[in-house]
Each structure stands twice: as structure tokens, then as C-alpha cells.
Image: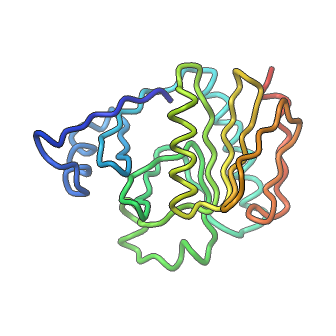
Amino acid sequence: MNSYALNLDAIFTVDDVNFELICRNNPEIKFERNAKGELIIILPTGGEIGRINFELMGYFAIWNHQKQLGVGFDSSTCFKLPSKALRSPDFSWITNERWNSLTPEEQAKFSPIAPDFVLELMSPSDSLRDTREKMLEYMDNGVKLGWLINRKNKQVEIYRQGKKVEILDNPKTLSGENILQDFSLNIEWIWQ
């Protein structure tokens, strides 16, 4: 998703209350807030990226239903990260233990938790630099595994806690490693 950052410090601070009001009063627009407090406007995806996101969600949903190890979330879910950023990955997943440690109120709102796994699928109009910054922000806030799928370059960048980013050229499969146990994703179809 292409995005635009707005610094509104001269007018008001985009704190949690104001962020929620902005979202509620503009339901047709998707917003995030970065750690600097800037309001991020996320543009909708086109049909092709939406189709791929849907297919990816299906693979994760089937695996999650079979394993019952955690909870998956779509791109509409906003998480309040420890840095105070409010982010919505294209797909995210949290272990049952961590999710169930939140109160019902915390689960119902912008949950104050970093997912264990995040996936970002780049749209043709996305900035690679901005998306990489977002992935690093996830890792800085406790995400354990992240995949940045770049269809244009036929690459996947794998982000792991405390490790250098690994870039795979035209991979056939991706492994959920020890985070998404026994999850393997054939992604050859994404490059077509």
C-alpha cells in the first residue's frame, strides 16, 4: 500500500485518543501512526495485490485452523507497538499465550502488543525504502519474524530478531521457522 505521512504537530498531537477519533470520523480511510507521531494515510491496493493478499490469508488461515497455536489478523487490524506506533501489517499472527495475556478490552481496541509474525506485500506504488523502515520498526518493537514480499523484484526479505536481513531471490518456498511451526508456503505463484 502506498502511504503518505502527515506531521500535524503544529495543530495537535496525534495521541491515542485523537488517532481513534480520526479513524472513527474517517472510516473510509486507513490510517497508521509511526513512532515519530506522524499520521500515515494508507491508500488502498489495486485488484492484483488484493487478490494475492486474499490467497495468502487463505494459506495462513488453513494452517492456523489446523495447528491452533495462535491468532491471525488481516490488514485492517491495528496494533499499538511499544514505541507507541500504531501499525497494520498486511498479515500478522500472535501466539495464543501472548494474545490471551491481553484483557478483553485490550483485545477489542488497538491491541498493545507486537505480533510474533508480520507479512508485508508490496504494491507496485510502494516505496521499498519506506516499507523496509516499517519492517525494521516491527523488529525493533519485538516482532520475531517478518516477510517483506517484493513482487516487482521477485524477492523476499526475511527479518528475524537480532539477525541481519536475509534477501531471497525468486524463492519457491518460505518457512515459518520456529515461529509458525510446520508452516511452509509455496510462493512460486506470486511471481507469475
Could you tell whether 180 is left or right of 19 in the image? right
The quadrant in which residue 171 appears is top right
Q: Is residue 189 left or right of residue 179?
A: right
Q: Residue at x 64, y 69 (%)?
A: 95
Q: Residue furthest front?
A: 164
Q: Nearer the viewer, residue 32 or 131?
A: 131
* Residue at 20%, 57% in the rendered image: 17
> Picture quarter containing residue 3?
top left
The residue lying toward the viewer, choosing from 179 and 53, is 179
Q: Is residue 113 above or below residue 103?
A: above
Most extreme residue toward the right is 172
Residue beneath the point at 41% across and 66% down: 112
Q: Where in the figure is residue 149, as x and y percent of width and height?
A: 69, 35
Seen in the picture, residue 102 relative to 80 is either above or below; the reply is below
| Colour mapping | rainbow
Residue at the image point whose x is 60% and y is 64% from the top: 94
Left or right of 17, for residue 152: right
Percent x, y for residue 118? 61, 51
> Nearest the camera: 36 or 31?
36
Work out which quarter of the rendered image holds the C terminus and state it. top right
Task: Report x, y in % for residue 135.
Answer: 57, 46
The number of numbered badges drawn on the structure is 0
Residue 78 on image: x %, y %: 43, 52
Viewer-closest of 92 and 136: 136
Judge whether 192 appears above or below 60 on screen. above
